[in-house]
Image (cartoon, helix red, strand yellow):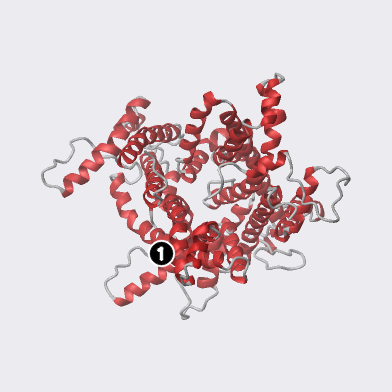
Amino acid sequence: MTDPIDPAAAGAVSPAPPALSEDTRIDAPARNQWWDVWDQFKTHKGAVFGASFFIFVIAAVYLGPFLWTIDPTYIDIRARNSGPTWAHPFGTDQLGRDMLARMMAGGQTSISVGLTAMALALLLGTLVGVLAGYFKRIDGLLMRTTDLFLALPLLPLLLVMVMLFRQPLSASFGPETGIFILIVVAIGITSWMPTARIVRGDVLALKEREFVLAARSIGTRPGKMILRHVLPNVMSPIMVSATLGIATAIITESALSFLGLGFPPDFPTWGRLLFDATDFMQQHPERVMWPGLAISLTVLSVNYMGDGLRDALDPRIRGL
Amino acid sequence: MLTYTIRRLLTAIPTLIFISLIIFLLLDMAPGDPTAQLPLTIPPEVREQIRQSLGLGEPVHIRYFLWLKQVIWTEPLFYLSEGVSWIDAPDSARLISWQTRAPVMDTLFERLPQTLMVVGLAYVVGVLIALPIGIISAYKQYSVFDQAGTFVSMIGFSIPPFFSGVLMIILFTVMMPNDSFWWFPSIYDTTLVVDSWENFKAQIRQMVLPVMVLALQTTAQISRFMRASMLDNLNQDYVRTARAKGMTESVVVLKHVLRNSMIPVVTVIALGIPSIFGGAIITEQIFKVNGIGQMLIVSIQASDLPMVQTITFIFAVMIVLFNLIADILYGILDPRIRYD
């Protein structure tokens, strides 16, 4: 079980003095603490590998279409169901659409949904956590709300939300943007609770520290206090939950698409491609592998990245 | 402890009522019309009468209280009257599904055994695999076994069930020769009646794939927890004392450390039970198990509101219930924690 007070936040304020060995000089040049974090991050092989892979995937799906210019919706019915060839390295689907182009287009959607939903969940979670931790009067109310959200069955509610608001949102924003907004919001408002709890715990601990007292004694207003003194010190747990949030958001979006309740059929996402490919599993098993591997490897790399980030931001481990 | 339990049970009631209200109101906004599937030849006034007979004419709060009364009063009373002779069957109407026109609860009780059999067994298998992995990983920290265990649980976290399930089907159903021992059916046959050794074997075989997929997820999580909890305890003073007393290593690890490390793990196992039902929604869909999760998807697609509301509410009840059980277990297992 974790400590109630995360030492990462405490250490971010005043990095633990490095062990003074023979070669450490007091007059070493001043250094930003993020360089220390980066040095520690580099020692975690899995994390470095994960981060590079994640950057590679992002580059591939966003920059790839400039190099591989086949339109993902172009139907070449004569070339349907082809295996991997030079013309179509990932093969084609049952309508002759190029799988590589579809994987890139699908990845763009999946990763955008992951990043945006994570940002929304983080924003909500940090807001609730900071407010609950800082203002004692609304603490009880906000934390009861968090507990209530944690007691809701999330996947069924997500499915229900998507079913309910699909038509009104598609009508007002167009089918693609509408569903995008819907899925991002749905994932965002069902996954902010862990962040809120962690942030609240850290803010509660920070509030008792001397520098907050000092800031208050010179008349700092609550808004300024939160922005300048509290928020920078809870950055590390927020960053760790950000990486894990990307992973859950990508998986949730793919799960919704896989259950047929995500994006419309002609709009590829990795989950949707996997769902479509399961119908042809017997004849073309490789078509299932591409989107499945893409989802799994992206999530795996993000998880490793989060693992390394957690170690790098923990001052007890850093510098060893 | 007893007062704590009673207090928690009492606070669970308003929570559940509030959750039921949220679920009901959210679903009540659904655009679907239950009469949309009926033939177009039905005149509008008859259609309106059908809607009235489904209870759609009433205001929201009346419908909410009627639904709540049906779920928490009429249905339990009905099942009690079936079993106990001196309780009369309730005279009010039972909760009827719009899609099947059968009582919602009857449908759920038909579906429950499949879900429990597959999901429940998967959870048990997952926990049984996870515990030894966690113990050995912690005892031999940073060994090859530990690294492999970390890697496998990372994979378990990262491969979503809809991919691992499909992967299993490709490996064990599509690519495997049909007459091989390692060939397993990918479709769960609910009509199979277990009355002979052959049928029993068929039943086991058709449960292998879904159980493996679900167990992978459970194993990944529980083995991590077990490892962390064992590591916390292995460095404690009492372990050194036990070793200093000259106890054998197996007694130290399996009696002293394991018992203490199991305390948080048991609560995590209890907390995971409701979430595994949520995860089963996808697994049931892949392997065509006609359990509760699959019923939920079908009902959502058919906008069968009473069914969706009831299933979602049952999930919520399970989450609240197992949270409570986990808290109470923690208090019972760890004498240092007393809530009074």
Count the marks. 1
Please state the horizontal and vertical placement of residue A73, each as a whole percent of the image: 69, 51
> Quick check: A191 left or right of A209?
left
Which amino acid type is shown beneath numbered disc 1?
Answer: Tyr
- Residue B295, visible in the rendered structure: yes
Chain for numbered disc 1? B
Residue occupied by mark 1: B188
Q: Is residue A313 above or below residue A96?
A: above
Say few, some or many: other residues with alpha carbon within 10 Å of mark 1 (under 14 / 14 to 19 / 20 or more): many
**Nearer-the-camera pick, A35 or B105:** A35
Residue projecting furthest to the front:
B245
> Residue A210 at x, y = what percent?
67, 30
Q: In which quarter of the image is the N terminus of chain B?
A: top left
Q: In this view, does B203 lie to the left or right of A306?
A: left
Image location of residue B167, percent across then percent down: 56, 65
Residue A133 or residue A261, whichever sits in front: A133
Give how far across and how far down residue A290 sits, in percent.
65, 61
**Which residue occupies 45% across, 31% down?**
B29
Residue at coordinates 75% horizontally, 48% vertically from top-left? A37
Which structural element holds mark 1? loop
Residue B209 seen in the figure: no
Q: In this view, does A64 lie to the left or right of A138?
A: right
Residue drawn at the location 43% of the way across and 65% of the way down: B255
Q: Which one is in front, B96 or B237?
A: B237
Give the vertical position of B24 relative to A57 (above or below).
Answer: above
Q: In which quarter of the image is the C terminus of chain B?
A: top left
Horizontal arrangement in the rendering, residue A2 relative to residue B48 (left or right)? right
Between A140 and A30, the one nearer to me in the picture: A30
Q: Which residue lies furthest to the left in this view?
A: B86
